[in-house]
Amino acid sequence: MEGFSVLNVFILSTPQYFLCFMFSLIILGESNAVPFKCDSSKFIANFVKMLVSAVVVSFISAIVGYFIPNMNITSIVSMVVYSIILKYIYKTTWLKSILGVAAFSLLIISFESLYVPLCIRYFYNGQEANLLNSPELKRFLCFLPERLIQIVAIASFWNFTFVIQKFKQYKIRLFGFITVIFILFFIEVNLTKIYITYFTSFDYTTKIFLGLCCFGSGLLNFVILYNYIKVITSVSKFHLERSK
């Protein structure tokens, strides 16, 4: 059972979900709800609203993790709560909520798959629970690269327009795109789980092969959203310049 820690919630989970909300709302074109991007008169209200939303998701995830020390289950619960907050607190549609979840999960969990399984394997004796129960400083350092990637992603898409408009503009089937993303995500998560759980029973060649598969699937998912959005943004700017 993972030890419940208020310190973990506030210094580890809350910053993660705060940045996740910023990233999702930017992707969804809800700039008026994003602190530092909204009107100065709305800054305090939007900051507090986003902070409270991040704390709610963090506390629920921590409670679930306390009883079920499994990162996959905790992540799924977080996604559900996250989408509900986008729907009812930020007044988005369910379609936008799902896309917001897809955006942050693709960014966060795929990047985690690039290095967290190896950290668990070699620094936490192959047990997720050991990572979840480790001291706050060690967990902070483990997930620090993830926070930096979130900041880079937010800065990259700071002036991005509503992504669903782009899907419609270029006649891309949104549900098909989301389905493909979650299929890739499902494959990635299960590869990672197999790698961590059965690592000691594999021979050396299989360990290398599965490690490369985990890294490759995580890298693939991570770059899909980033490069896709950058491409359609570039295309949009090209058409805008030609229309002038």
Image (tube, grey):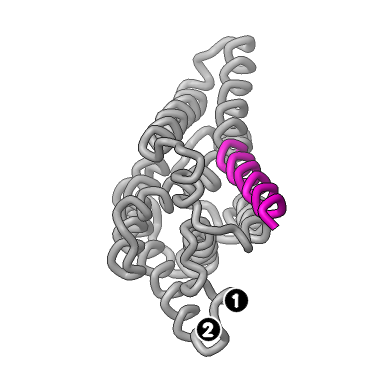
Q: Position of residue 43 (x, y in %)?
A: 53, 83
Crowding around mark 2 (Cα neighbors within 10 Å: few <14, some 14 to 19, many 20+) is some
Tell me what residue is drawn at x 55 percent, y 83 percent: 39
199 or 21: nearer the eye? 21
On the rendered structure, is 9 left or right of 87?
Answer: right
Q: Is residue 238 rendered magenta in the image?
A: yes
- Magenta region: which residues? 223-244
Describe the element under mark 2 as helix, strand or loop: helix
Residue identified by numbered label 2: 43
On the rendered structure, is 68 left or right of 138?
Answer: left
116 or 171: nearer the eye? 171
Q: Position of residue 114 (x, y in %)?
A: 62, 36
Tell me what residue is drawn at x 53 percent, y 52 percent: 134
Tell whether label 1 touches label 2 (CB within 8 Å): yes
Which image quadrant for residue 121? top right
126, above or below 36, in the image: above
Tell me what residue is drawn at x 46 percent, y 73 percent: 33
Residue identified by numbered label 1: 36
